[in-house]
Amino acid sequence: MKTVREGKAQILVPELREIVSSDMPVFYNPKMRVNRDLAVLGLAYLCSKLGRELMVADPLSASGIRSIRFLKETDCVGKVFANDINEEATRIMKENFRLNEIPADRYEIHREDANFFLRKSWGFGFDYVDLDPFGTPVPFVESVALSMKRGGILSLTATDTAPLSGTYPKTCLRRYGAKPLRNEFKHEVGIRILIKKVIELSAQHDIAMVPIFAYSHLHYFKLFFVKDRGAKLTNSLMEQMGYVLYCFNCMNREAVFDVLKIKEFCPVCGTRFSVGGPMWLGKLWDEEFTDFLFREAQEREEVSKETKRITSLIKEESGLQTVGFYMVSKLSEKVGIPQQPPIRKVVDFFEGVRTHFEGDGFRTKLSHRDVLEKSCELKGIIERRFKGGVR
Amino acid sequence: MKTVREGKAQILVPELREIVSSDMPVFYNPKMRVNRDLAVLGLAYLCSKLGRELMVADPLSASGIRSIRFLKETDCVGKVFANDINEEATRIMKENFRLNEIPADRYEIHREDANFFLRKSWGFGFDYVDLDPFGTPVPFVESVALSMKRGGILSLTATDTAPLSGTYPKTCLRRYGAKPLRNEFKHEVGIRILIKKVIELSAQHDIAMVPIFAYSHLHYFKLFFVKDRGAKLTNSLMEQMGYVLYCFNCMNREAVFDVLKIKEFCPVCGTRFSVGGPMWLGKLWDEEFTDFLFREAQEREEVSKETKRITSLIKEESGLQTVGFYMVSKLSEKVGIPQQPPIRKVVDFFEGVRTHFEGDGFRTKLSHRDVLEKSCELKGIIERRFKGGVR
């Protein structure tokens, strides 16, 4: 065993050769640091919002690191319910709670199938649930939604980004009932498909899971949802589903809510469209929540630099919530810009914002025709400068 | 309490004023006789197919009538697992098993939430599951699919026909993630949407639920599925989803698998299409299964007349599996036929088959243009006869 520090917690982690059970594929993954930082910040938001003691669930807890960070880094947790089906995990978890000197009345450790744990005793009782499964969260979503209080927040991780982003489209179709798009904003499409599924599975029970934050990383997607109830609000979510038409020739993209409005051919270049969806076409970020995460991240010492960077970038991005974005490299390739201009200049040129999804990605309000036209303009400017430099 | 006979079973049923718990909305519904007849016949098919002792589950058992009929009217049931969360139900159920002299080793009675019952101890173990919930089956579908053996059959009832058939389209969208169509074949659309949902919820787990029989009644839909496993087969089911475009002016209908092929306007009359779906566009009936139900129903004394009639009609219908059908009354109204001709004549005239969905409904291979043209022809014939009769 070795001791690892993260945030204000320290935990015992078995070294790889000590792990006796294959049920623990990744017991503690240091690459998930940003993910856990965000989970703590999301809980801090709920604390500030509700101003009372909260019931928190960590149904796939593994080392217990999240639960311990929740208790040590926020001031409103009444009790944390940490669960893992693996016996070794619950044993180490117990040690970790003791190591961090958490009082016994502040946590409960359970060893059950996560769905049973969620549905059994705490129906409609959790204020905050952090769900971080190995792979897809789909098998747990309904149980989570049912286990939560109205106004509660779900902090959700998905590591099956490959199917969602178009590497395995058939798996995506089976698991999510939607077609992905393997284009420059494939990760955004993946996140929108995941949101659709979460909303859909909850809507079956007249539960409205309202997406309030999305973050894409190479290996995982991180989402936050607020739980609400009632037919009307749930309808309004279901009505924000639709398809994205994408032209792999000229990069034109159109979001279509009404399937009758779907066109077969790109009106800009005449190529046959490709289609992704159905997916969530609504907002990815609630401005208030996003702003809180940004401010709180900057203020906290225990939060990683990467988390500070990401929340700042996403705060900018949340100011212009388009469906899809552009990548400077792809545009440059398309119109033949000889040298890729820096992203900040491009963002200003297109009156847009940066996106955290891709290093050289940006969002703009401009129509696709205008983007193509301005790209050619940009090409002219750069070519003149380039020639000037050579002379 | 009163005693009721149905099939080869007799059961005790509390009279309405005796029912102490509101958890038992309809304890024994005599209107569901056909439904239970079909459930017995479906099990008889599986008996003949597998030729071994079967494990049968009745997760929402109420009076136990189904379980008892399964045991008395088929010869392959190893054991029936009857479950109901209601204490009064399990108590009466016990009496009913005793009343019918079922040996104690042939049944188990459980009192649990149906989802817990299905997932808990018998994972992947049931050969035959009969699911007859109050309202929608959606909350139980995944648990059922997970609880079944490969090659097993699910006998499924849904009583929420109103949302599925377009009376409450928003409820349909929330619960099933699809838009219904309130046209002449709205019940068929409802059944196809229900099938989509069952396939979709199972596909999440790489389980293929293959629809093999559909029956629509005013108050409920009855479906049978065979459970299979594997990505390839599940993909092939997911690929048979699509939309139905319907013209409320000229009754034109088109089934569209590829969303890019969706048209906004009816090519026959130019009116804006309405759209239903996504839904299952594949076959509703497996011919072998349908034929077995028909033959078996005719041979069995204990099967009701209505079941004999329905299975005969559906056997005919299964010979021409179109998406959507026509109603003679609607066509007559449209083209102005003065007197509605008898359905049998119409079926011959359009080279079609009857449908059990509507008394005056029929399916035909003809294109919509041909149907309209032949309807005018039919009008001419009838008008000439009509005038002849008046003279």
Image (tube, coloured by chain):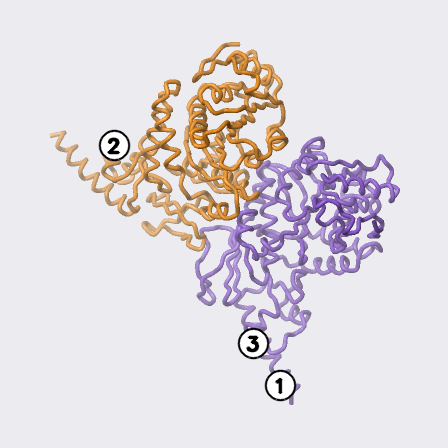
Chain colours: A orange, B purple
- The residue positioned 76% from the left and 37% from the top of the image is B81
Are the residues at dot 2 and dot 3 in contact (C-beta closer than 8 Å)?
A: no
Q: Along the horizontal axis of the image, is B322 left or right of B126?
A: left
Q: CA distance from mark 2 to mark 3?
A: 69 Å
Are the residues at dot 1 and dot 3 in contact (C-beta closer than 8 Å)?
A: no
Q: Along the horizontal axis of the image, is A2 left or right of A302?
A: right
Q: Give the letter of the chain under mark 3.
A: B
Q: Amino acid at mark 3?
A: Gly
Q: Nearer the viewer, residue B313 or A281?
A: A281
Query: Label for residue B387?
Result: 1
Q: Which callout, 1 or 2, points to the residue nearer the camera? A: 2
Q: Give the letter of the chain under mark 2.
A: A
Q: Can residue B318 be seen by looking at this rendering?
A: no
Q: Give percent across and percent down for residue A50.
A: 46, 32
Q: Along the horizontal axis of the image, is B29 left or right of A95?
A: right
Q: Secondary structure at mark 3?
A: loop
Q: Amino acid at mark 1?
A: Lys
- The residue positioned 71% from the left and 60% from the top of the image is B313
Q: Are marks 1 and 2 on the same chain?
A: no
Q: Which class describes the residues within 10 Å of circle 1: few (<14), some (14-19), or many (20+)? A: few
Q: Amino acid at mark 2?
A: Arg
Q: CA distance from mark 1 to mark 3?
A: 15 Å
Give the residue at mark 2: A344
Q: Give percent across and percent down for residue B182.
A: 55, 60
Q: Residue furthest front?
A: A52
Mark with earlier residue (1, 3): 3
Q: CA distance from mark 1 to mark 2?
A: 83 Å
Q: Which class describes the residues within 10 Å of circle 2: few (<14), some (14-19), or many (20+)? A: few
Are the residues at dot 1 and dot 2 in contact (C-beta closer than 8 Å)?
A: no
Q: Using the rendered view, name the quadrant where residue B114 is placed.
A: top right
Give the residue at mark 3: B336
